[in-house]
Image (cartoon, helix red, strand yellow):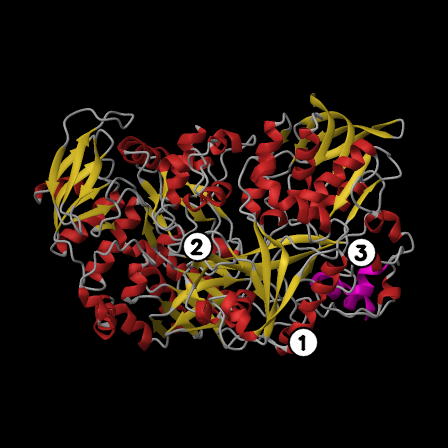
Amino acid sequence: MTEVRPDPKSVAGKAVPPAETADLVVIGAGPAGLAAAIEAARAGLGVILVDEHPVGIEVMGDEVPLHFGQAMTGAVRNRNAMMEAVLAAAPEIEAAVEAGVDVRLGTAAWGLYANGPGLAWLPGTLVGVAADGVAHLIGARRVIVAAGRRDMGLAFPGWDLPGVVGATAAVTLARRYQALAPRRVVWLGSTSEALAAALDLKAAGVEIAALVECAAAPVGAPDLVAALAAGGTEILAGHAVRRAEGADRVASVTVVPVDAAGADAGPARSIACDGVVLAVAAVPVVDLLDAAGCRIGFDPARGGHVPVVDGDQRTSIADIHAVGDCAGLWPAKARDPEIARAEGRRAARAVVASLGGAAGPEAAPTDGPGQPEVDPSAYRTAWVAASVVHAARDCTVCQCEEVTAREILEVRPPRYLDAAHDARNDRSLASLLGEGPPDPDQVKRLTRAGMGPCQGRRCREQVAALLAIGGAVPLDRIRLASHRAPVRPLSLAVLGSLPEHPDQAAHWDSWFGMKGQWRPFWEVPPQFRVGDDADGPQVSE
Amino acid sequence: MEDIRKAAVVIIGGGVTGLSAGWWLARDGIDVVVVEKGTLGAEASGRNGGGCSHHHSPLFREEQRLWPMMDELLGYPTEFRPNRVRLARSDEQMVLYGRALTNAAAQGFRSEVLDAKQAQELVPLAGEGIVGGYYYAFGGHANPHRTLQGYAWAMQDHGGTLLQNCAVTGFRRAGGRVVAVETERGAIACDHVVIAAGPHTGRLAALLGADIPLAVARAEMIVTEALPLMPLGGVDGNGLYGRQTLRGNLAYGGGPHEWLDLPHEGAPPKPSTPLAGNIARRVAELLPKAAHARVIRSWAGVIENTPDGRPIIDRLPEPDNVIVATLSSVGFGLSPASGRAIRDLVVDRACSFADLSTFRLDRFAALEPDWRERLGWLSAEAFAHRQGSAV
């Protein structure tokens, strides 16, 4: 048998042991993540719990991890005060510390890596984290992702004004940071998740001036609608937003009655407010899970694209579980955090059992999602039709790269090419299509929508809805545009702080480092045998 | 299954090589269909660094002649920008990047040697630590996605057809020729076949009894947010290939690759890894004034290599109406020329503008059967299996 030595330019033998290891890494210190971490720690596992909050004001300004929309007060500049606020907002964090969990706030998880098809050289499952300007890898025997939710963006003229904020971001600023600036807001969207968030914000002292819903009637739980109305919120069903206005931040919003197709059906009116809250859809945060390769599917009962999980919340990658809002959102779960906690405990018990520990007693099973109150595919598409398409096709959908709805639907080259008026480039979405529906990755590469530093957080779902409209297919047939690590923007300096194996550094090559590949063609012998090519430079051009 | 259509030429693979060939054939009025199992450029063609300076290749002169004309020829922007700067942070790198000068000079192309000061003047984001560099008055870079789409649209403008989401399942043969390509959406009768299916080229050619020695591997890149444009975006070196895009992003790759076993069907998974951090460090060393720039994505591509890393563009001896084309992991920049070479081989049976003898398949006639083992180009699973069976 031939003696086989691995290609020195390949990954073979280049793995670096992670800087630290843990039995279990939990990502996200919301109700589900905390419950999981506490359960596992009490069963004797070594648990690290990371949560990116409090994030700094610059990161908030980048709309990471939520659509903060400059709706924060100056208080967020004071990082110590914000750390105290985050701690005070979740008493379970203290319980976790007491249970022995290594809790790390202000620590963002930007990558999740597991060996699997196409990748076999890692020293195990790895979580990439960053805090205080340094990145490192944690080796984890198991990972529980509890990354929560974020908000679907919705474009209309003026949606880039400070004060237009996602519902999750607004509640986070109000509840976890005590630092929400707007005091009187207009609320867009009426699912039960949206209504529960609106009532939460109202309880935090924010006036909900009006609730705008493009459908003919609110779609969420009637008791929640009634509670809002009883508190003085005007319920404007069959309405859409046409624009937000203000000099340097939102001062008013113009709403208009719309018909079933989303077109104007009556006179517009203006409502004074200092904030507009985007609550059309709460979106499970699947970025880490998708980048890691966990199977993701569109489940209308769980709020759209969610990881496929088993009864123990285990994803398609056996070492990785998903719990809480990132594993699926439905009305009952939005109203009762015990459902998320139960998921966390269930995953933790499975992790403990898989590592040979003695798990605690079984908890009573919780109810699943049941029938969705609204078809998220049709509901989101209707909002985009009513807002983006009818308000103005020329309004910007991707704020980072300044791409309009029209440019997405016509697959126009980006503006930096200055070719927008070139008739040759006037191609429609139809010209891209194969037999399948439009591919969001293909469209984003050509138009650059979603390719900016907010990593598509504000436009991903809108672009998908636009492609559904343009391709005349239901939204759930539009593939999830791929997520890529790092799922948080990290500077070259910070990401570059990851260590490297000395053999990797010694053999680093720009390409394959093959002897023959870059030989000028006039020096290439007529026959090739590996044994004849043993000498010669082994570096790429 | 029904015969959904027929065409003079069926090209298997909607990557740069197949689409360029399709465009060259279509602009000659030839009835061509490109069939692609997924969407165009979804594999390595859409995942590369966009470089266009392959001075070692017999297609180099044609690559250099065509790129400045491509926007006009295609009618769509490719974002091509000429010339390239390579920066060295060590004497070793300085020697390595100097090989291009000799090769290019032998073919009539000019370059300049830069000292550290000149290099920093040319590259505003560079800083200390540069020992020198080279200015290549040739080559350049383009946007792979836009170029791919440009080939596809231009081919369609000339009457060619692109069938996406349409995997090839087999061939129909008669009289020593392929008479139809069978796909999951029906058969396409044809006079000629071009297999330009990247990593799948070997598997498809094997259906015709041809042995194309190929191994596939995964390699990675990263990209930052946009920065103000440098006067010349084609800047790399320090063990990296890549560029500043016309939008301003820094897109770079390099470092170790992972040899893989290709799945029998479907697209190979393409996970990226923490290698992104090691690439990021080298970008920050290359362009220290960009160290603050935030990395917003990393990705991987799966590419095939022949045992000597050089292309195969050749007609199979049998069936005699089949042309196999793999560019062996260096295909994007050469695509304007490789497509034209394939067109020549299909129509004229010989390339009119370059000597393709080094691309012939029969150079591997005496190749050792265990060439992958000898080169160490084995997947982790294959290594583990060998070690297991050796015990």
Nearer the observer: mark 3 or 2; the answer is 3
Q: Earlier in the sequence, mark 3 or mark 2?
A: 2
Q: Amino acid at mark 1?
A: Glu
Pinpoint residue B315: horizontal percent, then vertical percent.
83, 39
Residue range (magenta) = B370-391
Pinpoint residue A244: horizontal percent, then vertical percent.
19, 42
Q: Which one is in front, A288 or A333?
A: A288
Density class for disc 2 (Cα within 10 Å; few <14, some 14-19, many ≥20) is many
Q: Amino acid at mark 3?
A: Phe
Circles 3 and 2, Cβ within 8 Å, touching? The answer is: no
Q: Which mark is residue A287?
A: 2
Residues beneath discs 3 and 2 located on the same chain = yes
Q: Quick check: can you spot residue B132?
A: yes
The residue indicated by pointer 1 is B92
Pinpoint residue B68: horizontal percent, then vertical percent.
60, 45
- Tell me the CA gap for discs 3 and 1: 24 Å
